[in-house]
Structure formats: C-alpha cells, structure tokens
Amino acid sequence: MGNDYSFEEIFSRQVEGLGEAGDVLIGISTSGNSPNVLKAVQVAEKRGMKTIGFTGTGGGTLGTIADVCFAVESDDTPYIQAGHLIALHTMCETVENILL
C-alpha cells in the first residue's frame, strides 16, 4: 500500500474501501499529529462515520477533528500507549458485554 500510493494514505485508502456511514473509526496517534491517521479520520467523516481519537497531552490535531478524543495527559510515550491499551481493552469488553 505504501509503495503503490503513499504512507500518508495507508489508512485512508482502507477507510475508503471498507468504511460505511454509521461505522466507527478509532484513530491512534501519540502526538495527535500523524498525517496518515489524520487523513483516515477526514475520509471517515466524509463517509458519515463517527470518529474517536486516542492521543497524548493536548490531543494535537486529532483531538480537534475527531468526534470524541481520549487524551492521556502525559508526554511520556510508554505511559500514553499504556493508557490507550487500557481504554481500548475496556471498550472491547463493554461492546462484548452489550452484544453477548
């Protein structure tokens, strides 16, 4: 994908091919400024999808364009990513409990 298009489009192309209105896209970027994640969120919004951003302190651009932003208030990458893992596992467990 990166060779045929660009690494900036590596996620957005997948959203274009698979995303539908009503779906939810979760974008994860420690800085909140990863161009490939931002582009995917922008494409998702154009397709009528809801978006959730997972970021570090301040949220970066992702924090301003996602419908909901979960920002781990730290500048330490391992702490941010550990916080994201806890939140994502909790989200998955909640969805499973609702569906099952």
Image (cartoon, rainbow, N blue to C red):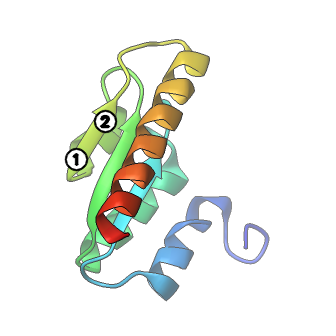
**Total residue callouts:** 2
Task: Give me the residue at 32% from left, 40% from top.
Answer: 61
Q: Position of residue 81 (x, y in %)?
A: 55, 29
Q: CA distance from mark 1 to mark 2?
A: 7 Å
- What's under tag 1, amino acid-wise? Val
Q: Is residue 65 or residue 77 the one in the foreground?
A: 77
Q: Are marks 1 and 2 in contact (CB under 8 Å)?
A: yes
Q: Is residue 10 above or below residue 52?
A: below
Furthest-front residue in view?
Answer: 100
Q: Position of residue 47 (x, y in %)?
A: 29, 80
Question: In terms of secondary structure, where does tag 2 sit?
Answer: strand
- What's under tag 2, amino acid-wise? Phe
Label annotation for residue 70: 2
Furthest-right residue in view?
Answer: 3
Q: Is residue 96 or residue 84 the one in the foreground?
A: 96
Where is the C terminus found, in terms of image quarters? bottom left
Task: Give me the residue at 68% from left, 74% from top.
Answer: 5
Q: Which residue is mark 1?
A: 68
Task: Give me the residue at 53% from left, 17% from top.
Answer: 79
